[in-house]
Amino acid sequence: MIDSAAPPSASTAQKTARYILIVVLVLVGAWMLRRFLPALAWAVVLAIATASLFNRWSARFPGKHRHLWAALSFTVLIGIVLIGPLVYGGVIAVREAISLLRHYAESAQGGPPPLPDWLMQLPWISDWIQETWRENLGHEANNALVQPKHEVFEWTRVLGLQVMRRITTLGFTLLTLFFIYLRGHELTQSVQRAARRMFGPSVEPLLVHMVGAIRATVDGVVLVAVAEGAVMGVVYAIVGVPHPALFGVLTGVFAMIPFAAPIAFGLVAVILAASGSVGSAVTVVVIGLIILFIADHFVRPVIIGGGAQLPFLWVLLGILGGIESFGLVGIFLGPALMAALVSLWRTWSAEHPTAAG
């Protein structure tokens, strides 16, 4: 009797040890790759969002190695789309920074550097700004602008490290994206088999809803934000805003975050008003509010709510909570998590209760 009872207990102990080992390995692996998790998350989001486009792109390539060339070329295309605006914005930012530093260096010999004209034209507070500038930027500030080159070098070093870190993240994102494109079908099947083995067949609706939520969020957030930035960029160019393309890209980035777009076109309106173009500033604000109203009340709820099969309120909460928890990539991970939770709730609430009468 003792011998016959031993194998089941040993089998249970082995299964428990195996699951503990799996959990430990996953945690250790996640800790080891913690610096690369954002790149992996971005690659998965981009792969899900562009899956249909990549399938159509891949169909254009004949031959034995068509998957390789399709994955490589499409990854390069995605890289150009992502890197192009970053390079443009970086060039503009560096050029403006160099111009500002040169202006300060040239004017430092005669006392505190003069304030920009548009800042001096601000109503009600221009006198206070000028007085504060003179009091706080006396000879100490003058010497601080001219002599401490080591501070400039330190600032440049820190900025360079941040830029290199972002470039590295982008590089690993594109590298991961390439392999996802190359082995996308195999990866999808592997994930589905592993999920069914661990959680049973009921996990498949969760995966479908999460993928749908990510695609819908990309369409409803990113594409709509790009459209908002493009339209506002044209408006900026018409009213004479300096660097309209840069401000258009900035507006598009802010438009991805709920309620943040007014910060971008509001800043542009302040710059226009400070320079005396009050009519242009009012035009920017009015057009920006109209576009924001249409996008937030008509376009996004239809796209995101229909694709993710979620009420827009839950999508909004998922976006805000995702940004707070995971950063920018949380814009897409948050709605996916909310879609999984809502799917679980709907499944459990639809189950038939046990027979009670």
Image (spheres, rainbow, N blue to C red):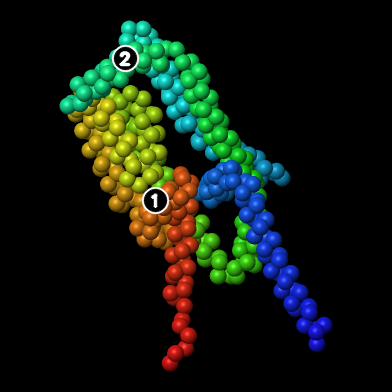
Q: Is residue 270 above or below residue 41?
A: above
Q: Residue 48's x, y, as percent?
A: 53, 51
Q: Residue under circle 1?
A: 320
Q: Is residue 16 above or below residue 138?
A: below
Q: Residue 33's x, y, as percent?
A: 62, 46
Image quadrant containing the C terminus: bottom left
Hey, which residue is sitting farthest bottom in the picture? 357
User: Of marks 1 and 2, which one's residue comes earlier in the chain?
Assistant: 2
Q: Is residue 50 above or below residue 190?
A: above
Amino acid on which the number 2 mark rests in the picture? Gly
The residue lying at 38 percent from left, 29 percent from top is 245
Q: Which label belongs to residue 138? A: 2
Image quadrant containing the N terminus: bottom right
Badge 2 element: loop
Q: Residue 19's x, y, as percent?
A: 67, 65
Q: Residue 55's x, y, as percent?
A: 57, 49
In the rendered image, is residue 15 in sight? Answer: yes
The residue lying at 33 percent from left, 40 percent from top is 261
Hey, which residue is sitting farthest top in the picture? 110
Q: Is residue 14 above or below residue 79?
A: below
Q: Which label belongs to residue 186? A: none
283 or 14, which is in the foreground? 14
Give the CA distance from mark 1 to mark 2. 44 Å
Amino acid on which the number 1 mark rests in the picture? Leu
Find residue 117 and report its image quarter. top left
Tell how many labels: 2
How crowded is the residue under tag 1: few (<14 C-alpha within 10 Å), some, or many (20+)? some
Q: Nearer the viewer, mark 1 or mark 2?
A: 2
Badge 1 element: helix
The residue lying at 34 percent from left, 50 percent from top is 299
